[in-house]
């Protein structure tokens, strides 16, 4: 099925001829009505006029084709870059080329991986802890794909420290070399430290490399390396869980663009809600699939419903305070623990990705 979000009559007429020649089914829609078809289509065809609306209202996806009337102008190339279009096709000149593109097998691989981005509303919100818990829970599910936990916040302590595997041998971001924008999924998996049989962790280094005259040198992902890592794991059908900095950057922006689900972790306090509104505004510009996880305690009595209303975001899960968690992490690193509030929240997040009902508890 080919989804058309083309409004220009001349382009639409040419597209209809091409789709018929390629023996494909054409579904015509508007951006506002395209959410379900957007995910289910083997290819999406847009024109320059709707690119900005697609970028604002729909998640980033592969196999997008941008049509233009005549030779592409600068505005057309900018629109293509905005939505990550793989082809820019001039009509009616390039109808034959478009028949070839659409005639190829363009269905998304059944084993294409899932990407989850977890962001904190403020410092100490617990985003790293939730991201690691989601990864642990994903890796522990029977017959589930392998899981990769990616540290995309170079100012954190390092996810290997959180999990208690900082002394495990294996690759960190500082040792990763990406040539030509691609990396072998098998080589990457074999090089990374593990946390159990089905979870690999790519962490930022737990200490800076040294002090230079211009400041502190930190090792973390670059836009090229984060793209290569996520692409490699996705090609293998893995679940990729990313701990993302709450500060905008090319790396954070890319992860949010790529994610199937973005999760905002918000403590149940007034100040966290205010900070969360700012972070949510940034995240939602990159990914409309954004939900909130509310974390207790709630010293002022705020409930998950209060936080959800403040942020105007759907509630993915809420969890009460767990006073034993900090000590457990200090002693042996984060682990999946029985019926803990954190583990229940992680299951709720994964349940959203699976299409199962979402959690609906209270923050305090």
Image: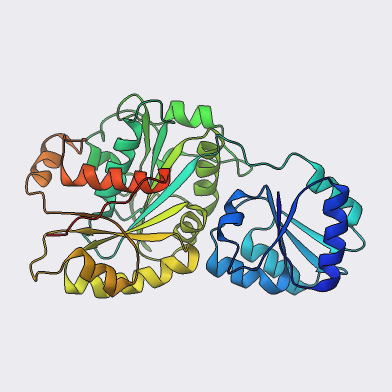
Picture coordinates of residue 155, whole percent (x, y)? 31, 56
For residue 69, which quarter of the picture? bottom right
For residue 331, which quarter of the picture? top left
Camera-side residue of 231 and 360 = 360
Taking 312 as reference, is 39 left or right? Answer: right
The residue at the point 24 percent across, 55 percent down is 360
Taking 24 as reference, is 225 left or right? Answer: left
Taking 251 as reference, is 68 left or right? Answer: right
Picture coordinates of residue 334, whole percent (x, y)? 20, 39
Looking at the image, residue 273 lies above or below residue 89: below
Picture coordinates of residue 359, whole percent (x, y)? 27, 51
Residue 206 in view in this figure: no
Picture coordinates of residue 267, whole percent (x, y)? 20, 63
Camera-side residue of 348 and 68 = 348
Taking 347 as reference, is 103 left or right? Answer: right
The residue at the point 83 percent across, 45 percent down is 23
Camera-side residue of 357 and 79 = 357
The residue at the point 30 percent across, 47 percent down is 348
């Amino acid at each position: 099925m080919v989804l058309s979000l083309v409004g220009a009559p001349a382009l639409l007429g040419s597209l209809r001829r091409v789709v018929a020649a390629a023996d494909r089914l054409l579904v015509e829609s508007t951006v506002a009505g395209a959410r379900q078809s957007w995910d289910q289509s083997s290819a999406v065809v847009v024109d320059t006029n709707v690119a900005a609306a697609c970028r604002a209202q729909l998640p980033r996806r592969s196999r997008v084709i941008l049509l233009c009337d005549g030779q592409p102008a600068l505005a057309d190339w900018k629109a293509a870059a905005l939505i990550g279009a793989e082809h820019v096709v001039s009509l009616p000149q390039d109808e034959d080329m478009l028949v070839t593109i659409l005639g190829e097998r363009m269905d998304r691989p059944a084993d294409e991986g899932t990407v989850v981005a977890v962001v904190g509303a403020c410092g100490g919100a617990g985003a790293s802890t939730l991201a690691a818990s989601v990864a642990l829970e994903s890796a522990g599910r029977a017959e589930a794909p392998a899981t990769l936990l990616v540290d995309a916040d170079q100012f954190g302590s390092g996810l290997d420290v959180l999990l208690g595997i900082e002394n495990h041998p294996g690759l960190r971001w500082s040792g990763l070399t990406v040539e030509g924008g691609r990396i072998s999924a098998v080589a990457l998996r074999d090089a990374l430290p593990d946390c159990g049989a089905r979870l690999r962790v790519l962490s930022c280094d737990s200490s800076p490399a040294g002090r230079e005259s211009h400041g502190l040198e930190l090792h973390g992902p670059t836009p090229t390396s984060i793209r290569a890592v996520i692409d490699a794991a996705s090609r293998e059908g893995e679940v990729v869980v990313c701990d993302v900095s709450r500060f905008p950057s090319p790396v954070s922006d890319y992860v949010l663009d790529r994610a199937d689900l973005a999760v905002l972790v918000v403590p149940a306090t007034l100040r966290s809600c205010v900070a969360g509104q700012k972070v949510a505004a940034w995240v939602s510009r990159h990914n409309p699939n954004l939900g909130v996880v509310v974390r207790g305690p709630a010293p002022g009595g705020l409930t998950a419903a209060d936080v959800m209303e403040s942020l105007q975001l759907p509630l993915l899960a809420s969890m009460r305070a767990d006073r034993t968690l900090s000590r457990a992490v200090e002693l042996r690193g984060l682990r999946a623990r029985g019926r803990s509030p954190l583990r229940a929240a992680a299951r709720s997040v994964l349940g959203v990705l699976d299409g199962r009902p979402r959690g609906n508890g209270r923050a305090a």
